[in-house]
Image: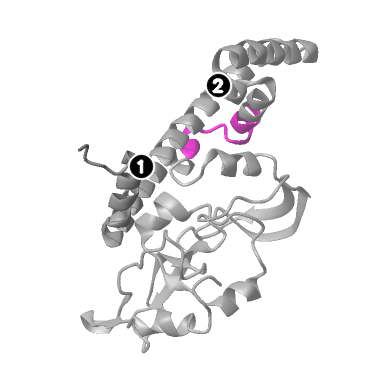
Amino acid sequence: MKKKTRPPYKLATSLLSNAPQDLLAELREWIRQVRISAARVVDKHLCALYWRIGTRIRLEILKDQRAEYGAGIVSAVGRQLEAEFGRGFSEKSLRHMIRFAEAFPDEQIVSALRRQLTWTHFKRLIYLEVSGLAVPVEDPRKEAATFYKTSGLKMVKKAEGEAPAGPPFLGEPPDLETYRSRGHRRLDVRIYETKCTACLWACKMPVEMIIDHWNPSKKRYRFETFCYGPKSCSFYRAGPTRKVPGRKGMSYTEEDWVDEDATSYRGQDD
């Protein structure tokens, strides 16, 4: 008599139902993280490539001042590259790359920003236009920015479409009172420099320290980095405990509860 066996698909279903759920959850998370990391690495290289392509085409166009020549070059190159490499190199895409090179002519700045921003972020930034007035800072020890006394700021042209989900969080910064009301947490300077300089909730601020309160003219200056963003932000890492130097070699250490208290009223995703 022939022995009956279960069909293979039923056996597979039975084995799957017996798989440890905690093990599956851990393996799934590993796979997701590696996929995200791989996508970010590829995007960084693509941003560098797009900048080089935009710069090269722009230089080619500048050789001849005729507008029709430039339009013809972009159109012809776009048709050829799209046929060979797909829609990512179409005429429309090439125009994004040229605009990218125009908006960010310094390759070093592009190299620093592409560690934090994706191509989607860059495409929004390159079409923003802002006008206003400002003057150079008088004392660079007290200012993290190059200019101050900024006035008359006006958004001349906004980027089209919705801003990509953060982090980093891009868009028009809110007013000063919004920042003050949100409260800040100290932010690790390396995280700020590698991931958060473009984020509207991250900032680098000058701090004035009075070393001797019996002699208020004795001061020191340093820059510190802070985060006003959601407490659930995956980029956030707390900076070291703040230590303020005092007179006769003494120092004051700010406890962690100061940051916690400043943001205690906000939810994790606010």
Q: Quadrant of residue 240?
A: bottom left
For label 2, the crowd category at 10 Å Cα-Cα, with few meaning under 14, some 14 to 19 and many 20 or more, is: some
* Label 1: which secondary element: helix
In percent of the image, x 33 and y 57: which residue is there?
25
Q: Is residue 109 above or below residue 169?
A: above
Q: Is residue 107 magenta?
A: yes
Rendered view: 259 above or below 5: below
| Helix, strand or loop: magenta stretch | helix
Magenta span? 98-110
Residue holding disc 1: 9
The residues tagged by marks 1 and 2 sit, at their Cα atoms, a distance apart of: 51 Å
- Camera-side residue: 89 or 153? 89
In the image, residue 126 lies at what x, y percent?
A: 65, 39
**Residue 256 badge:** none
Q: Nearer the viewer, residue 172 or 103?
A: 172
Quadrant of the rendered image containing residue 220:
bottom left
Label placed on residue 53: 2
Question: Quick check: is 41 in the magenta stretch?
Answer: no
Image quadrant containing the C terminus: bottom right
The residue located at (61%, 28%) in the rendering is 97
| Marks 1 and 2 in Cβ contact (< 8 Å) | no
Q: Residue at x 55, y 21 (%)?
A: 53
Q: Residue 79, how many percent across, how many down?
A: 66, 13
Identify residue type, mark 2.
Ile
Instruction: Specify whether residue 216 is in view.
Output: no
Type of the residue with mark 1: Tyr
